[in-house]
Image (cartoon, rainbow, N blue to C red):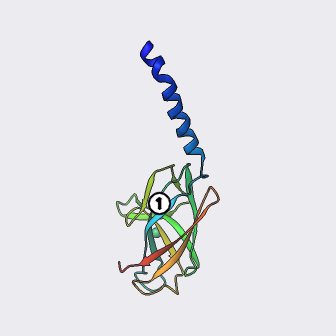
Amino acid sequence: MRLSRAFSPTVLLILSIGLLAACSGGSKAPTISDAWVRPPMGADLPAAGYLTIVGGDTDDALIAVTSPVAASVEIHETMAAESGMTGMAPVDRIDVAAGATVVLEPGGYHLMLMGATDLPAVGDTVELTLSFESGGDVVVKAEVRAG
Ligand SMILES: [Cu+2]
């Protein structure tokens, strides 16, 4: 086909430019937005953390979280229990596919800040360090919001 032969060099050139663009600048780590923390519902109860993760250039996973205001931070998933009630359980990781959006929100994945004794007042921020499987750490400021 004469038409496709005439166009193919142009197509190849565009593909080459695309590959160069993809390779330059190194890999992009996941980005975090809308991070917030809900104070504990009562004494000795954990605070909850929520945020939105947008995956970077490659498939990745959130594998650990720390915060200076909490003794430890667990990653939890809310799920329906056999009784019909909802319960929650710790998970080792949250997979974040390249470019995918994963939302940690009430009723779904969330963070539990255990032993958060020095939690700032509502309207202030706490620091969360999210560790990804790729080796990258992302530090975010999470706003403390009333329930
Ligand atoms: Cu939980």
Q: Which residue is mark 1?
A: 53
Tell me where residue 2 sits by quadrant: top left
Q: Name which residue type carries label 1.
A: Ile
**Quadrant (top left, top right, bottom left, bottom right) of the C terminus:** bottom left
- Residue 38 placement (x, y as % from top left): 41, 77
Rendered position, 130 above or below 30: below
Residue name at image x 38 percent, y 67 percent: 106
**Relative to residue 116, is residue 137 drawn left or right?**
right
**Quadrant (top left, top right, bottom left, bottom right) of the N terminus:** top left
Nearer the observer, 93 or 81: 93
Crowd tier of the residue under label 1, counting other residues whose Cα lies within 10 Å: few below 14, some 14–19, many 20 or above: many
Residue name at image x 43 percent, y 77 percent: 143
- Residue 78 placement (x, y as % from top left): 42, 62
Residue reaching furthest right? 135
**Relative to residue 104, is residue 16 drawn left or right?**
right
Residue name at image x 56 percent, y 53 percent: 60
- Residue 108 placement (x, y as % from top left): 40, 61
Tell me where residue 144 sits by quadrant: bottom left
Nearer the observer, 49 or 3: 3
Tell me where residue 138 sits by quadrant: bottom right
- Label 1's element? strand
- Residue 134 placement (x, y as % from top left): 62, 55
Rendered position, 142 above or below 132: below
Total labels: the figure holds 1
